[in-house]
Amino acid sequence: MTGRETALRRAVQALTVFTFWVAGAIQGLAEPLSRDILAPYIVPPMSLGEQISENGVWQLLNSGGAEAGYVFETEPMAPLPGFSGAPINVLVVLDLNGRFLDVQLLSHNEPIFVSGLGQAPFHKFFEQYRGHSITDSLVVGTPYGSGGDGSALVYLDGVTKATASVRIAHESVLAATLQVAREKMSGIATGPPAYPDQEVTEELTWEDLVTQGIAVRKVVTNAEVDAAFDGTLWEDDDPDAKDYPEETYLDLWVVDLGPQSIARAVLSEDSLAELQQFMSISTMDEPVLVVETARHGLITDDFVRNTAPDLISAEQGGFPIAFRDADIYVEMNADVPEEIRDGTALILRTDRRLGFDPTAEWELQVKALRAHGVFQPEIGSVTFEVPYQAPDRFFARQDVIKPAPPWVDALRNRAGDLIVLGVFLTGLLMLLGLSLNRLAGHRYFTPIRLGILAFVTGFIGWWGQGQLSIATPLAVIRTAFEGGSYAFLLYDPFSLALWGVTILGFVLWGRGLFCGWLCPFGALQEFTAHLGRILRLPQIEPNAVWNDRLKLLKYVVLAGLVALLFTTPARLDKAIEVEPFKTAITTFFIREWYYVAYAVGLLVLSMVLFKGFCRYLCPLGAVMAIGGLLRGRDWIARRTECGTPCQLCRVKCSYGAIRKTGEIQYSECFQCLECVTIHDDRNQCVPLILAGKGRPLQKVAAE
């Protein structure tokens, strides 16, 4: 290792220690936003209530001031890092039934949206959540294979060129929402509800229903009602209860009619047919029969059909069940005892999608009313509970379709691209690893190289969006310091494959594999450089002193970006624009004029200063040079005559990566193979020419 590379390594170590120190000094957990910031996001007549959790969960209040749901941010509960390394913070408004009322983007630093595609597509993506429930299997993308019509998955449209960022945002929303559902909404089902299995049939009688607990009875005597009102204003307002304490006040039967076998045992043929017609239309409703045979009567004179009965309510898991009249005429089977057939009967219905599970225990609640006074009487009530649970054997539950992990979806969506990329990378590695010298000496080497670079620009860059960026190493650094997950790297398998090959290239050749062969913007610069030569434009080449000074600029830029990462990360997305990659590759030069002018200016500069941006300014190039310290060998063969007296390779090297001594400066080598071509060419290499004239040849082989 040369003295200069040793100094570079020490500088990198010092920079690492400094960034660790800065991170430790300023790092803190994300704090929930204040009421003043969140309140304007809530659309009237809803309003923001009180904060009910340390991690930023707030009450959602309706116009009457009653709790109607929950409001929360995703970052305090699910701080999944995006591609900037910072979490995407989203505001979620959820009702008590687990349905998304609103989802809005609060803040993010995703580079593709900040100054690439603009904010509008990202904001529009979140509008798709409205109306969906946490019971829905929400995924980002399009149906894969046969998963289209009839699929239980609900697909949210992603954003072209930003699918990875959108998937991270989606995972943040789901992770935070399910956490709130588990902690604050334990009665809400987070899976598909049970539904009557019409394949199950049994011959049942009313007696069977009673014996098996399918028909549940609740009897309340007058004395028990009196005891419930004892000590209240209404304790003496029911003379019948006083006079006949042993007689029945409430004689209530409850039967779940969802399963056909049960309904057939209870209802007459006409009522059964009407129920079946109702269920064929209202497929997600669960019908429940209630029959009252005593003096309670179930309903008041004000009751309106097809509405919620004013004396009946229900709850499951501490959450209300929205029962209302199904408006079905109830006539019972002749096998049902006559006193029950003569009672007051209602078939109630509730939507299973709102979290009701007929196979889990729930409570029917019946109010007993009393009136005190003659004129404008005061009404008092007590409630009697009837626990009920339908037999599990009559019900089925839709298999929970678990969405594939995001990285699996990402692989599927880009399977074709990844196959082409894999074939190309394998071929390139074999070409450079097994026959590099033969390639460099090929008579058509320049057209071959330009053809490869054209493929890199077109397929890897513009088509595959595989332009690596400094944003990824910075995000990795931030994640390392904050102890987050590196899963965000899996959301873009195309770029991840390029990173993998690039890291392998560090060991085999240094920085040259990526910077010389796999960087789309670097390829564009090389094309413009060839154009400049064709146009015979005068070339600028700094002298050795200035060349060495200018090469240090990229490390200064890198250090500045790392410092911003830990001090003012909000400015980092703009600072990263020092890379023209987003303009030239990601958005095809379709951006604000000043970004386009900058990118085009760098390409024009390359026509007279060969790959000036790559050599002197590129922060990603600085990372690649640092990674190149992993290089395990000096792969470019040298002779003792290289540098003394021969200077041909140094003069021909467009990157200024060869010292006067003939030594290769691998941290600046872009693997253009020009020196390899000269080294093996008996018509160019001075030592070989002299050896052909009888001079002895000495060679220092590559390690």
Image: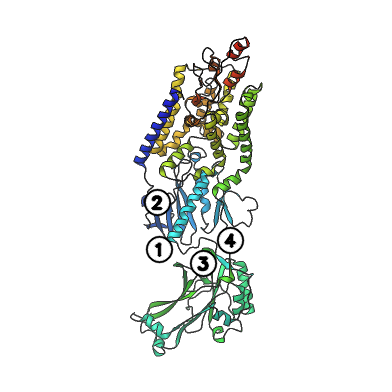
Residue contact between numbered discs 3 and 2, judged by CB atoms under 8 Å:
no
Name the residue beneath numbered marker 3: 356
What amino acid is found at the position of numbered circle 3 in the picture? Answer: Phe
Q: Residue at x 58, y 29 (%)?
A: 517
Q: Is residue 10 above or below residue 304?
A: above
Whole-percent x, y for residue 560 in the image: 41, 32
Q: Mark 2 or mark 4, which is nearer the start of the sequence?
A: 2
In the foreground, 390 or 672: 672
Dot 3 falls on a residue whose secondary structure is loop
Residue 238 in view, yes or no? yes
Dot 2 falls on a residue whose secondary structure is helix
Of badges 3 and 1, the one in the foreground is 3
Residues at marks 3 and 2, CA–CA distance in whole angstroms: 31 Å
Q: Residue 399 carries which label?
A: 4
Determine the image quadrant of residue 515: top right
Of badges 3 and 4, the one in the foreground is 4
Q: How is the image coloured?
A: rainbow
Q: Which residue is drawn at 54% across and 54% down?
A: 138
Name the residue beneath numbered marker 1: 66
Within 10 Å of disc 1 (Cα), the crowding (few <14, some 14-19, many 20+) is few
Q: Residue 180 carries which label?
A: none
Residues at marks 3 and 1, CA–CA distance in whole angstroms: 22 Å
Name the residue beneath numbered marker 2: 38
Residues at marks 3 and 4, CA–CA distance in whole angstroms: 17 Å
